[in-house]
Image (cartoon, helix red, strand yellow):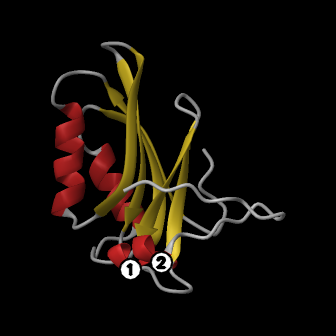
Amino acid sequence: MNTIVKLDIRGRLVIPKEYRENLDLKQGDNVLLSLDYKTNTITISPIYGKQNDLVKMKIEFGDTPGCLAKIASNLAEMKIDLVMTESKSFERGTKARWDIIADISKTNFTLNEIKKSVLSTKFVESMSINKLARDSLHY
């Protein structure tokens, strides 16, 4: 589905009713805006969990086949729901980074326990994890 909407004088846009209904979006719901500089696009994604259950993570790890999948399995075992992710190699074949927005509402682990678990894998070099506050998604 595609449509064209116009920004108002304050830079706001209205998500058409048909889109809101299909995504079950109601007044007061949170959405994640993601800007892709390379394609010059904005993506709007519904956030169905409570905003105070959202965290941002940065994980740096060895860029070898299977590492990302192992980290993802570790997070899944802790019942962490990945809302948005982006991974990239910054030293091809040596180092990569995974940026994650995650919903931690279903996990019983604290932020420190999540970090300790991820860091305990032999291929993760560093990790940061922080609760999200409004407008704090910028890396």
Q: Quadrant of residue 70?
A: top left
Q: Secondary structure at mark 2?
A: helix
Between 29 and 6, the residue placed more toward the observer is 6
Q: Position of residue 102 (x, y in %)?
A: 39, 61
Q: Which residue is mark 2?
A: 17
Q: Is residue 93 left or right of residue 44?
A: left
Question: Quarter of the image containing the N terminus?
Answer: bottom left
Whether residue 74 is situated above or below residue 17 in the rendered picture = above
Between 23 and 50, the residue placed more toward the observer is 23
Residue contact between numbered discs 2 and 1, judged by CB atoms under 8 Å: yes
Q: Which residue is mark 1?
A: 21
Q: Is residue 64 left or right of residue 128?
A: left
Question: Which amino acid, by three-letter code, is at mark 2?
Answer: Lys
Q: Position of residue 105 (x, y in %)?
A: 35, 77
Whether residue 74 is situated above or below residue 31 in the rendered picture = above
Q: Secondary structure at mark 1?
A: helix
Q: Is residue 61 left or right of residue 66?
A: right
Q: Determine the residue located farthest toward the right in the rendered image.
A: 9
Question: Quarter of the image containing the C terminus?
Answer: top right
